[in-house]
Image (cartoon, rainbow, N blue to C red):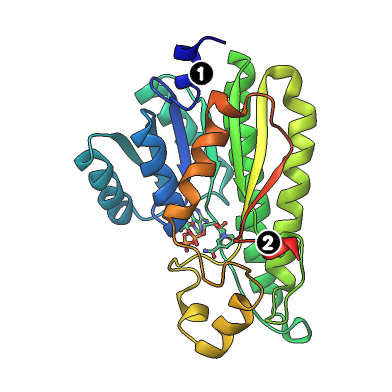
Amino acid sequence: MDVEEARRLFDLSGKVAIVTGGSGGLGRAAAAGMAAYGASVVITARRMDALEEAAAEIAGAGGRALPVSCDVTDEESVRAMVRRTLQELGRVDILLTAAGIARRAPAEEMDMADWQQVMDTNVKGTFLCCREAGREMIKRGAGKIITVSSVRGLLGHPLGYAAYGTSKGAVHLLTRQLAVEWAKHGINVNSIAPCIFWTPLTEPVLSDPEAAKIFLDRIPWGRAAVPDDFIGTVVFLASAASRFVTGQIIYVDGGNVAG
Ligand SMILES: NC(=O)c1ccc[n+]([C@@H]2O[C@H](COP(=O)([O-])OP(=O)(O)OC[C@H]3O[C@@H](n4cnc5c(N)ncnc54)[C@H](O)[C@@H]3O)[C@@H](O)[C@H]2O)c1
């Protein structure tokens, strides 16, 4: 590899990325990060007003973003979102699945409607997006899929994560499964497993000093992460820099799972 090629390892110019949960804390940061490296980004979630705001921010920074409404739990909605991406931008090179929800409750009190909603969004929703984008990547013989799991997919926690942790453990396995199945199609499939980040999802927990302490005591860096801490790993996994990396769960966690 010559110096010029090495310098371009992280370049995403000409690439098209779909980011689900694109109006949320981590999805929005990931979309902005990939746009900064040259990708055109389709940002999706259900509410158009939030997506339009996120797209305007990316456009304001000189990037290209297309907001598309999509409910990841609805098969037809996911299909329509990928179709729209192809119509408007012609291809899908990268998929990052940041759409996700959490419902916390002590296991003995877990409501099964909540349980199902978590599974539908985090597991079925992730799979549907991977399947639909994956079909397009298979046609091209190349692609980068980045799922978003969690430290909770590896470790139990006292604050009621039976549904959420189970769903994220499933995302870990789904990531490895797709990595093995789709390696022959030139598709890298990896997962980013964050610890606790400041986003709308975690605001209620981090704003409660007692609960926050339970999380922060487990993080050697001693702080919650911020969405910008997510971007470098996203760009790495979306780009040629990670071309021989697949089936990995990368913990962006300030050392949380190290000890
Ligand atoms: N914030 C954290 O500390 C943290 C830690 C570990 C893992 N995660 C995971 O990262 C991902 C993003 O989390 P976040 O903190 O940005 O949360 P967030 O609540 O800020 O954003 C979640 C996004 O998902 C979208 N979404 C939810 N249900 C959807 C559906 N049915 N269809 C389409 N979009 C839907 C929301 O509209 C929003 O855009 C989630 O999968 C979450 O589990 C977050």
On screen, residue 107 above or below 32: below
Tell me the amino acid under the disc marked 1: Ala
Query: Mark 1 highlights which residue?
Result: 6
> Which is nearer the eye, 119 or 41?
41
* Residue 247: assigned label: none
**Does the Cβ of the disc 2 residue fall within 8 Å of ligand 1?**
yes
The N terminus lies in which quarter of the figure? Answer: top right
Which is more toward the observer, 20 or 232? Answer: 232
From this viewpoint, which residue is outermost toward the bottom?
A: 210
Identify residue for label 2: 151
**x then y, percent, for residue 55:** 28, 44
Give amino acid for label 2. Answer: Val
Is the residue under label 2 in contact with that under label 1 (CB below 8 Å)?
no
Residue 8 visible in rendering:
no
Q: Is residue 127 above or below residue 154?
A: above
Tell me the quarter of the image containing the C terminus.
bottom right
Q: Nearer the viewer, residue 46 or 244?
A: 244
Q: Is residue 143 left or right of residue 55?
A: right
Does mark 1 have its CB less than 8 Å from ligand 1? no
* Label 2 crowd (10 A; few <14 / some 14-19 / many >=20): many
